[in-house]
Image (tube, rainbow, N blue to C red):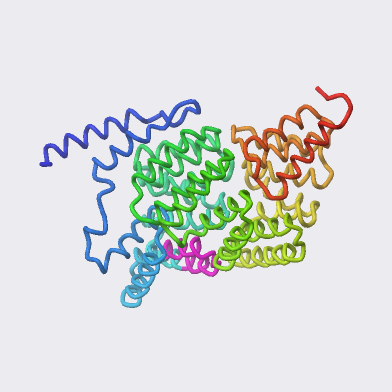
Amino acid sequence: MDSSETSETSKTCETETRRSAGRFGGRKAAVAVAVLVVAAVAGGLLTLGPDDVPPSAAPVIRADTVTGAGAPAAAGDLSALIDERQKALREHPDDDASWTVLGTAYLEQARRTADPSYYPKSEQALGRSLKLRSAAGGNYAAMVGMGALANARHDFAGARKWGERVRAAEPLRWTVYPVLIDAYTQLGAYDDATAAVQRLLDLRPGLPAFTRAAYELEMHGRTGEAKSALEQAVGVAGSPAETSFCLHRIGELAWERGDVRGALRSYEAALRADPDSHPALAARARARAALGDTEAALRDYREVTGRVPLPEYVLALGELYESLGRGAEAREQYEVLRAEVKLFAAAGVSDDLTLGLFEADHGDPKAAVRTLQDEWRRRKSVLVADALGWALHRAGRDAEALPYARKAAGIGWRGASFSYHRGEIERALGMRAAARAHLGEALKLNAHFSPLQAPAARKALDALDKGKGQDEA
């Protein structure tokens, strides 16, 4: 293709991209991801590949490219990038750009390994970059890195501040929008999140945009469109780690719809693409347990918690043990969870949502209420609304719980656990018809959504069917 043809193609793609603007923002509209992918490839945004660089440099360039864009990096590539930047900084310690790259690489390493010691390392490296070249001096890459770090530590308000500072100064810097999207979503600022997703799609259609668009669509109950967005993301994935990430997310959509076998196929495909993917391994364990392959599920859970002891994985293993009547092993996992939460907290990572749900079900519901009330003051997410409503129910405060359960359904996200929690709250309040509807919905969405709560939902439905009395309006 000569230069005139390239220029004409680029103009056409820019026109198509502009035409697509606004299509995402309306909740009833579809995301024009196919058009945007064509525009991105034809416009030359996704052309760099490992064949374009010397083999020895390829892992470093691949990792640098994806960590800077907020995408997953392969374990080997990431280690190569960290080693290369550490060596370069020993020779040139005043290179602010290299400190930024190292800080973002440490952050990705924290995500891949669940080693909380990488969070302070990331903060130190990014802080060093900002000392060498300040935010006022235009060190926007380090500021974006600080925003991503704040998101990873669940300091979503802090992430929003970093992101909005960068956007105010450089609104065309596309790398800031993944930070803003993640922060707005977790803070419950859903209109702002939708606008930021649309802006990212307009500026830089690609994997970070498509995967975040998919999550946004899913949260609004548009799961078919979310799957389409993820399928387009698979098509532009530039590495096995990126492909694995997208396949895992496709599996999660299937799981939420109750298609356990379809979910399992996606998780296994994700693991074939990237055997180091701990989210896919944990998800495969959950699917195997749902299908009755208990021993295989336990093997997967033991492997993933041994490698990456994230609190949510440890909790899932403990609850599987509990569902099997293996109480001592379950309690052991719950103690591990408490220890892991403390380790992460020491590294500046708050996980009060997981801790609150754990305390509500397996510890002190009153403590869960206090924890989740504090979390609700920080962020008005539907996830926190659901968790706080459930904790209030478990603490015997059902009249207070119901408004939060209703808030959790406010944007259209239909999750089995949400429906179960609401149904149990309504049952406790004597709202028999509503309780029956929501408990039934939970099992219809996914009959295996939890090894403990799915059987409890069936038992509650049976009790409602056998019970007597007048339904409340």
Task: Name the residue at 69% across, 64% down.
Answer: 333
Is residue 289 magenta-colored?
no
Q: Is residue 342 above or below residue 354?
A: below
Number of labels in the image equals 0
The percent coordinates of residue 73 (x first, y second) are 40, 59
Question: Which image quarter: residue 177?
Answer: top left
Task: Name the residue at 34% across, 40% down.
Answer: 203
The percent coordinates of residue 305 (x first, y second) are 59, 64
Left or right, 447 with reference to 223 = right
Given residues 47 and 450, the one toward you in this image is: 450
Task: Name the residue at 59% across, 59% down.
Answer: 296
Prevailing secondary structure of the magenta residues? helix
Determine the residue located farthest toward the right in the rendered image: 469
Determine the residue located farthest toward the top in the rendered image: 473
The quadrant in which the C terminus is found is top right
The percent coordinates of residue 2 (x first, y second) are 10, 41
Is residue 114 magenta-colored?
yes
Given residues 426 and 405, the one toward you in this image is: 426
Magenta segment range?
A: 103-124
Left or right, 387 with reference to 173 = right
Given residues 424 and 182, the one toward you in this image is: 424
The quadrant in which the N terminus is found is top left
Task: Name the residue at 50% across, 41% down.
Answer: 215
Q: Is residue 364 above or below residue 470?
A: below
Left or right, 184 with reference to 392 = left
The percent coordinates of residue 201 (x first, y second) are 38, 38
Left or right, 392 with reference to 239 = right
